[in-house]
């Protein structure tokens, strides 16, 4: 019996192994990995059986079995596990034949399985190398496609078993050499790679063996033959791969062949390697590495002298130098790892050569630097840079030669050479190779290339002429490379100055000399940085700066330096912070200048630095350049004043004069130089010197360039401040010589150049010089000069200029003349400007506007000219004599048309219009003899401006005086009847003018209104005017007449009081109908473009409403509301709109407020439907109306009550078909509801103190309404209509802000827009909680409102009310009566037809305050027990969750009667598909652990053990919450299980980890404990776990497989083991291993491996049949063909028999 049972177990084990082997081909990688791991674990038990099964399944090869790689890996593990006794040669040969046969029979190449087959053969070789190699050698006898794979196996074996392979290398070579000659190119890389691996194994053997290389002469002969073949044949192949692999192999073989053979091979091998070094990076790296090995062996061998003379290495150096140049490039694409490795290998080759032949290599490199090949030069320079620190001593004698070479290359044109030189200079300087004149040349080289500017980079001609005089420049240069060269040179300069102390003697004071030349201007910032660093170091030493500076005669003088640096300050945004660097270096160079100057700079320089410290901020100011230039001039002028040394000043002037050639005339620097020299001449008293320098300035200027022309004029003007007569004399001579076509004589005053300046430019320059001379000249002496200039009509010659810039210059000159007169008047020297009107004519002529008003040319230049002309006209108009009428009309006619200009270009047009308005203001201020004439003029202007008054452009409205034209009313009227007067409309039209900013307009408007009412009262009474009280009317009219009399006398009166008296009188004089018309037509008046008039109109309306509001009917109130709302919508000014809002509030307060509220809400709803209210310009006016209501003392409470009433009344349109609602009706309802919500939000957000007080008083009502509407609108959101919900949430958050509940606001912001019902419930509860905490006194009235809402018809509102009450109940501890009422309400509604309401009622009962819970505990537990069986799953889940909560406060007596019932119901819920249900059910099960004492203990313990397997399985549930709940329940139940050591297992880390491997480790340890301590219960555990094989979750099935296999593996009692083992094993082999889920199949594979490993199923004796011939192994295939279902049937039919047999 025992033998038959053992045979059955062995058969089952065999089938399991076959199943595992078959699983190696599973589609899921996880299953394959599990099967592979299981087989590797099983293999040591019976490697022969595993090998047999693998051999069986491998029949047919990879065509029948998809994962041959896995099979071979298992076989390799089994072979390694074989004992020496089992590792019989014949058996291993069979296995080897399987692997080799598969390789041979397959024409497909699969890397994975071929590597696995190689691994198998390598494993066989570890037992019997000769057998494995013999099997492989069988395929060397003839051509076969598997030969490369066999060679690769030998290569892998050599790498893995070098010590066993190397002694057998001779046998390998014996079989490989005969076939080498017939190897095709496609296979040669494999052979070459094999030779490389074999040579590496030989080197490993040499390193491990104590003696030398154990190669006999035959092996050496073979190696030499292979070496020769590779060298002479394969390296010459056309296939790059063959050449590369051959060279790589030769690189490893060079140390294994004889020196004589190596020497003879060098002429062949070196060219081959060098050829490959020229290829791409991948190939070049391999070739360079092999070349490095070759040079090491050839030159640095300890066994003899170098095999190569230096002359023989020339070819290597010549080839590698260009490659080093290529790899030394700064192209980012080469800065990958392979490129860097290649470059390093090349430099290592140079270093090896340099270590043997240092001097020869140095001379060679220097000679290459003299060649004409750019690549060789760059490579040589880079190599010198690399080797110089490493061969410093050897190359010390070549220092002079190296320096000379560098000097000779400084003028090379190649960009690559310059880049390499820049880097080499730093290395040479750091090793003291540079000093004296060569060092200065090197520094000059760096400075020259640091001077490349951004403008140069964009101008190829400049680069070609200034930097690279090379015909091939366009082809060879790269702008990016030039930028890199500049960066390298700048960095190199800074390194020389900062990090190399020896360079200080070279740099100082040589760097000062490099500031002056024009070609080095771009490098001044960097040079200044270097000088600053040097000065910091020098000033710390005893030797002062000026001593060394004066010791050199070639250095520029301090004055020359100061002049140069001062002008270079011009651009504050120049690259490299040039201005800041110059200011810094000036302070450090202070000892070179007069002492007072240095002290002055210490105070002023920080201020100038501060102005330019933030370039981005500086760019925001459009006038920053002008401001900065003025600061430079002031700085310079004060510096001259501080020095107070005429000799030094004259020397500085000479320096300025000599520097004109340093700057381009088109540059702003030249203009600044003019101004600086002019400022200096202002300080000089020598008239002859001044005249000479003026001549010099004129000769070195360019009149055709506006910026230079302006700078010259300003400079001449500065000179005129002290030498006016000298300047005027010079200008007079120039002007005289400009006539009679003597153009050459004119030009002789300006330039010695032969180029003739354009006459326009000449006249423009002359005009500017006259203008600035007058502007800067002393006011005490300019009257006669200006009169002479104007009187002689010299300016008339300039009128014929044509170019726009020339016209602007002449106009500017005239403007400057006028400003000079104004400045003199301000200083008390007043005099009239003669021929002022003629000058105005000049300006108008130059402006380009003649008698025609048509605007035909809107070019930018013309607009600029016109803008300048308007400014000049303003200046001329503002000076004496008074402007005549004709001239005034001429100016106005020529300028008023500018109001019609288009808006673009906006910056120029806006400036022009601004100048025009200023001009008109000046005309009004300075023209006219009396008030009447001025008024007439004003009216004339206003008539002309009427077309522009209504313009939307701000600059066109600023001159609005249209309302003043009312003074032109005729003096006689045709008296109509009162109705035809339309007093309502007329008064509303003229009333705004009564508050106008202009006195005349106000006077006329009041007179007109008084005249209207005087006429109206003189007419017969009309039917419509029966409500007029004549006595009151005449009194009001008398008051108006008095007002008119007062303002006519120009008495000093308060204008506001006057306006109020006018309004009061008008209010009395108007009839009711006229008042209604006035109020209806108020929109235009309230929107008047004159703000003061608009405000006055609004104030008048407010007065009318307050005093006459009782006269208005509802229809009148409605129309008035509409008019005021229209005004509010139209107005964008905040103040004016607020005044209109006050009027609307006043209307609501003094009339029917419901009508006003209804209309406002209707308009709001309409706007919401038809407009995008968020994009309305000036904001949405209706929102401001809401704000006004909420801030009104009287209306705030009324409006809030109104909103809440609408909110409760307004139904939510759901578009249900059964209700018969159409889309238009629902849309209208939605708009009203949304408007109501918006109004509430505005009230809450903008109500201020008054609104907040109203909300505080109505807190319960507002909160309840919001909560109920929140639930209502969430039901819409579930249908996809989210707009109303979003609006309500905004209002709700505003309510939180209003009442100061920050926490509630955060809750709403976080979860408000969740559309799920559960989220809404949570939101309402959190809101209720926050309210209860913040305002406990409001809980009672709020609950009273919400309790009534539980009976509402709408389900959503009932749910919201229940949610709020379920939270409020927690805070009713101090209100027993309220608590009892709420509990009663909740208990009544636990049977509501809404599952949500039932759940919420239960939640509320659970949250009864703890101090009162004991009173209601029985009632609550009864409800929970009943709802655990509710038909709705969500209610069940709520019941479980509530049970968890209640158990925390329940006593033993309350729970004990229903304990078992609770456990049974919870067990039923633990298999729910709902993850929350499962997690909470397990958690509640664990929570009941504390009640399992007393009389129910035994029943409780049985329930625990019945649930234990399920609890274990769900410890690794797919859901995290279930896992955590099970872990917690397990920890709570563990003490009650009476299993020793269980608690210690739960304290280990793997219990809390989520990795499956940790879970499986825990299962193994747990089952070990259970099987050892509770064997009697294992039977029930196994039954429960086996039932879980059918669980709906694949992960639980996999867990069950793992649990069952572990219990079976640790169970020793055969009485329990036998029936379950066969059943489980059959299920694993059958159904579970064929599960559609990969996780189940993987667990089944691991379980089978575990059961096989822990049982006695695999015995060595049982596998002896494996030793038969492989041809008989088909019977195993037949065994495998037996289906797993049949096997399962056999084992399940006779479980008792098997058990009895074991017994």
Image (spheres, rainbow, N blue to C red):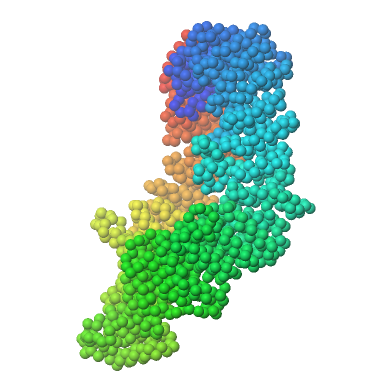
Q: Is residue 58 left or right of residue 278?
A: left
Which image quarter holds the C terminus?
top right
Which of the pair 1332/1002 is nearer the observer?
1002
Q: Residue at x 59, y 49 (%)?
A: 518
Relative to 1309, does residue 131 appear above or below in the rendering?
Answer: above
Whether residue 1034 is visible to the viewer of this picture, yes or no, is yes
Q: Is residue 588 left or right of residue 1314?
A: right
Q: Residue at x 42, y 69 (%)?
A: 843
Relative to 439, does residue 1635 appear above or below in the rendering?
Answer: above
Q: Residue at x 46, y 45 (%)?
A: 1476
| Quarter of image, res 842 | bottom left
Q: Where in the figure is residue 1162, as x and y percent of width and height? A: 31, 67
Relative to 81, does residue 1345 appear above or below in the rendering?
Answer: below
| Quarter of image, res 319 | top right
Which of the pair 1434/6 is nearer the observer?
1434
Q: Where in the figure is residue 1592, as x and y percent of width and height? A: 42, 35
Whether residue 1076 is visible to the viewer of this picture, yes or no, is no
Q: Where in the figure is residue 1453, as x and y percent of width and height? A: 53, 52
Which of the pair 43/1311 is nearer the observer?
1311
Q: Where in the figure is residue 1673, as x and y percent of width and height? A: 48, 11
Q: Is residue 447 left or right of residue 553?
A: left
Q: Residue at x 36, y 67 (%)?
A: 849
Q: Is residue 708 left or right of residue 915?
A: right
């Amino acid at each position: 019996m025992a033998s038959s049972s053992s045979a059955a177990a062995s058969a089952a084990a065999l089938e399991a192994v076959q199943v595992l082997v078959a699983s190696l081909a599973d589609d899921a990688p996880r299953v394959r990995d599990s099967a592979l791991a299981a087989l590797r674990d099983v293999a040591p038990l019976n490697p022969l059986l595993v090998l047999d099964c693998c051999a069986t399944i491998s029949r047919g090869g990879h065509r029948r079995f998809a994962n041959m790689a896995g099979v071979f890996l298992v076989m390799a593990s089994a072979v390694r596990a074989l004992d020496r006794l089992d590792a019989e040669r014949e058996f291993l040969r069979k296995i080897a034949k399987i692997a080799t046969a598969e390789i041979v029979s397959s024409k497909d190449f699969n890397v994975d399985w071929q590597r696995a087959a190689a691994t198998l053969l390598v494993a066989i070789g570890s037992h019997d190398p000769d057998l494995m190699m013999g099997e492989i050698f069988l395929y060397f006898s003839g051509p076969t496609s598997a030969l490369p794979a066999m060679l690769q196996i030998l290569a892998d074996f050599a790498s893995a078993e070098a010590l066993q392979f190397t002694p057998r290398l001779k046998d390998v070579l014996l079989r490989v050499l005969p076939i080498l000659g017939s190897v095709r190119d496609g296979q040669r890389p494999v052979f070459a790679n094999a030779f490389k691996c074999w040579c590496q194994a030989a080197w490993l053997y040499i390193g491990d063996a104590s003696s030398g290389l154990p190669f006999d002469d035959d092996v050496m002969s073979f190696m030499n033959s292979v070496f020769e073949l590779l060298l002479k044949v394969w390296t010459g192949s056309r296939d790059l791969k063959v050449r590369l692999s051959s060279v790589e192999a030769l690189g490893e073989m060079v140390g294994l062949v004889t020196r004589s053979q190596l020497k003879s091979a060098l002429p062949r091998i070196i060219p081959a390697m060098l050829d490959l070094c020229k290829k791409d990076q991948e190939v070049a790296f391999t070739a360079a590495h092999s070349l490095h090995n070759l040079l090491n062996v050839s030159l640095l061998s300890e066994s003899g002298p170098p095999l190569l003379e230096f002359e023989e290495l020339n070819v290597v150096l010549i080839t590698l130098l260009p490659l080093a140049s290529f790899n030394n490039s700064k192209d980012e694409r080469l800065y990958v790892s392979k490129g860097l490795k290649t470059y390093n290998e090349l430099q290592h080759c140079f270093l090896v050569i340099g270590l043997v032949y240092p001097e020869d290599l140095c001379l060679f490199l220097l000679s290459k630097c003299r060649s004409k090949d750019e690549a060789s030069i760059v490579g040589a320079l880079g190599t010198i840079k690399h080797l110089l620190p490493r061969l410093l001593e050897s190359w010390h004698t070549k220092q002079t030669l190296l320096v000379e070479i560098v000097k000779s290359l400084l003028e090379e044109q190649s960009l690559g050479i310059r880049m390499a030189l820049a880097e080499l200079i730093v290395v040479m300087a750091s090793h003291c190779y540079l000093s004296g004149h060569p060092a200065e040349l090197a520094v000059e080289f760096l400075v020259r290339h640091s001077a490349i500017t951004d403008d140069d980079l964009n101008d190829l001609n400049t680069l070609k002429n200034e930097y690279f005089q090379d015909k091939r420049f366009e082809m060879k240069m790269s702008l990016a490379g030039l930028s890199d060269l500049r960066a390298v040179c700048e960095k190199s300069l800074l390194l020389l100055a900062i990090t190399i102390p020896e360079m200080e003697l070279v740099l100082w004071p040589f760097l000062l000399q490099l500031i002056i030349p024009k070609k080095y201007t771009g490098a001044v910032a960097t040079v200044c940085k270097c000088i600053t660093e040097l000065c910091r170091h020098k000033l710390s030493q005893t030797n002062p700066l000026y001593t060394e500076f004066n010791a050199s005669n070639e250095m520029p003088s301090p004055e020359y330096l100061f002049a140069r640096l001062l002008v270079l300050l011009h651009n504050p945004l120049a690259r490299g912070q040039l201005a800041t660097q110059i200011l810094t270096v000036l302070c450090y160079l202070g000892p070179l200048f007069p002492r007072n100057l240095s002290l002055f700079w210490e105070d002023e320089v920080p201020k100038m630095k501060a102005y330019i410290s933030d370039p981005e901020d500086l760019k925001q100011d459009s006038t920053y350049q002008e401001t900065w230039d003025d600061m430079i001039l002031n700085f310079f002028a004060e510096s001259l004043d501080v020095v107070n040394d005429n000799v030094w000043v004259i020397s500085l002037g000479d320096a300025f004069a000599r520097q004109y050639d340093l700057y381009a005339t088109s540059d702003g620097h030249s203009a600044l130089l003019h101004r600086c020299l002019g400022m200096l001449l202002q300080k000089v008293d020598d008239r002859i010197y001044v005249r000479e320098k003026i001549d010099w300035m004129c000769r070195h200027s360019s009149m055709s360039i506006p910026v230079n022309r302006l700078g010259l004029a300003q400079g001449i003007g500065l000179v005129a401040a002290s030498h006016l007569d000298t300047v005027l004399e010079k200008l007079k001579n120039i002007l005289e010589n400009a006539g009679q076509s003597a153009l050459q004589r004119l030009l002789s005053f300006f330039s010695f150049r032969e180029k003739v300046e354009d006459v326009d430019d000449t006249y423009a320059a002359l005009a500017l010089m006259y203008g600035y001379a007058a502007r800067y000249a002393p006011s005490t002496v300019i009257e006669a000069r200006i009169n002479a200039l104007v009187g002689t009509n010299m300016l008339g010659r300039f009128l014929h200029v044509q170019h726009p810039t020339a016209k602007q210059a002449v106009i500017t000159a005239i403007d400057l003349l006028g400003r000079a007169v104004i400045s003199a008047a301000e200083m008390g020297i007043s005099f009239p400007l003669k021929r002022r009107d003629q000058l105005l004519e000049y300006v108008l002529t130059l402006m380009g506007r003649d008698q025609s008003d048509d605007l035909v040319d809107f070019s930018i230049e013309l607009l600029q000219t016109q803008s300048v002309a308007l400014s000049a006209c303003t200046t001329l108009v503002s000076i004496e004599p008074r402007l005549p009428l004709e001239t005034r009309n001429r100016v106005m006619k020529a300028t008023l048309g500018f109001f019609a200009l288009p808006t673009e270009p906006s910056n120029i047009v806006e400036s022009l219009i601004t100048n025009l308005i200023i001009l008109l203001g000046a005309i009004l201020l300075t023209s006219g003899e009396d008030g009447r004439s001025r008024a007439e003029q004003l009216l004339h202007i206003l008539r002309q401006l009427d077309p522009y008054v209504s313009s939307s452009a701000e600059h066109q409205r600023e001159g609005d005086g249209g309302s003043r034209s009312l003074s032109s009313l005729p003096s006689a009227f045709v008296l109509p009847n009162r109705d035809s007067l339309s007093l309502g409309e007329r008064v509303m039209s003229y009333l705004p003018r009564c508050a106008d900013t202009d006195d005349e307009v106000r006077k006329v408007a009041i007179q007109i209104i008084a005249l209207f009412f005087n006429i109206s009262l003189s007419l017969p009474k009309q039917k419509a005017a029966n409500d007029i009280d004549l006595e009151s009317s005449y009194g009001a009219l008398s008051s108006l007449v008095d007002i008119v009399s007062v303002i006519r006398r120009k008495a000093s009166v308060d204008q506001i009081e006057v306006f109020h008296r006018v309004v009061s009188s008008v209010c009395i004089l108007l009839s009711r109908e006229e008042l209604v018309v006035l109020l209806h037509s108020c929109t235009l008046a309230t929107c008047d473009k004159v703000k003061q008039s608009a405000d006055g109109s609004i104030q008048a309306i407010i007065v009318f409403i307050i005093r006459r509001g009782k006269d208005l009917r509802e229809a009148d109130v409605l129309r008035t509301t509409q008019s005021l709302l229209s005004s509010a919508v139209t107005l964008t000014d905040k103040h004016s709109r607020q005044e209109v809002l006050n009027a609307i509030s006043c209307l609501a307060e003094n009339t029917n407020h419901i009508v006003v509220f209804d209309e406002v809400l209707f308009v709001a709803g309409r706007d919401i439907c038809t407009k995008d209210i968020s994009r309305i310009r000036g904001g949405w006016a209706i929102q401001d109306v809401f704000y006004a209501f909420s801030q009104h003392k009287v209306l705030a409470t009324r409006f809030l009550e109104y909103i809440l009433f609408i909110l409760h009344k307004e139904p939510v349109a759901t578009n249900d078909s059964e209700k018969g609602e159409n889309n238009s009706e629902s849309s209208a309802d939605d708009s009203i509801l949304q408007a109501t919500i918006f109004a509430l939000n505005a009230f809450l957000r903008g109500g201020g103190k008054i609104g907040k007080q109203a909300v505080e008083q109505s807190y319960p009502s507002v909160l309840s309404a919001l909560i109920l509407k929140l639930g209502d609108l969430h039901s819409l959101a579930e249908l996809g209509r989210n707009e109303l919900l979003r609006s309500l949430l905004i209002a709700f958050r505003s309510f939180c802000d209003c009442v100061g509940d920050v926490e509630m606001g955060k809750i709403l912001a976080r979860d408000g827009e969740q559309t799920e019902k559960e989220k809404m419930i949570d939101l309402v509860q959190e809101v209720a909680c926050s309210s209860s905490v913040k305002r406990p006194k409001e809980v009672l009235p709020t609950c009273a409102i919400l309790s009534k809402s539980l009976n509402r018809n709408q389900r959503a509102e009932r749910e919201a009310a229940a949610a709020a009450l379920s939270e409020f109940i927690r805070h009713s501890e101090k209100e027993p009566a309220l608590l009892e009422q709420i509990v009663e309400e909740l208990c009544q509604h636990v049977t509501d037809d809404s599952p949500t309401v039932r759940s919420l009622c239960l939640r509320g009962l659970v949250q009864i305050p703890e101090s009162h819970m004991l009173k209601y505990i029985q009632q609550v537990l009864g409800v929970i027990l009943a709802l655990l069986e509710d038909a709705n799953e969500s209610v069940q889940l709520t019941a479980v969750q509530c049970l968890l909560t209640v158990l925390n406060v329940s006593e033993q007596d309350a729970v004990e009667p229903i304990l078992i019932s609770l456990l049974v119901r919870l067990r039923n819920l633990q298999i729910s598909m709902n993850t929350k249900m499962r997690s909470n059910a397990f958690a509640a099960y664990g929570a009941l652990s504390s009640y399992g004492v007393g009389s129910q203990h035994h029943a409780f313990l049985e329930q625990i053990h019945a649930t234990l397997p399920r609890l274990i399985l769900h410890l690794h549930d797919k859901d995290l919450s279930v896992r955590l709940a099970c872990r917690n329940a397990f920890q709570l139940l563990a003490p009650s299980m009476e299993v020793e050591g269980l608690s210690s297992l739960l304290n280990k880390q793997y219990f809390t980890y989520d990795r499956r491997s940790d879970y499986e480790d825990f299962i193994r340890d747990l089952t070990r404990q259970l099987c050892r301590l509770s064997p009697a219960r294992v039977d029930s555990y196994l039954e429960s776990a086996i039932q879980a094989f059918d669980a709906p979750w694949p992960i639980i099935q996999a867990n069950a497989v793992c649990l069952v296999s572990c219990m079976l593996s640790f169970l020793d009692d055969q009485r329990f083991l036998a029936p379950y083992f066969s059943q489980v094993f059959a299920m694993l082999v059958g159904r579970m291993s064929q599960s559609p889920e990969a996780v189940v199949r993987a667990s089944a594979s691991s379980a089978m491996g575990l059961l096989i490993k822990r049982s006695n199923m695999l015995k060595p004796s049982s596998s002896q049949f494996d030793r038969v011939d492989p041809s008989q192994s088909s019977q195993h295939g037949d065994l495998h063909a037996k289906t797993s279902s049949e096997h399962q049937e056999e084992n399940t039919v006779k479980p008792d028999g098997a058990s009895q047999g074991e017994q």
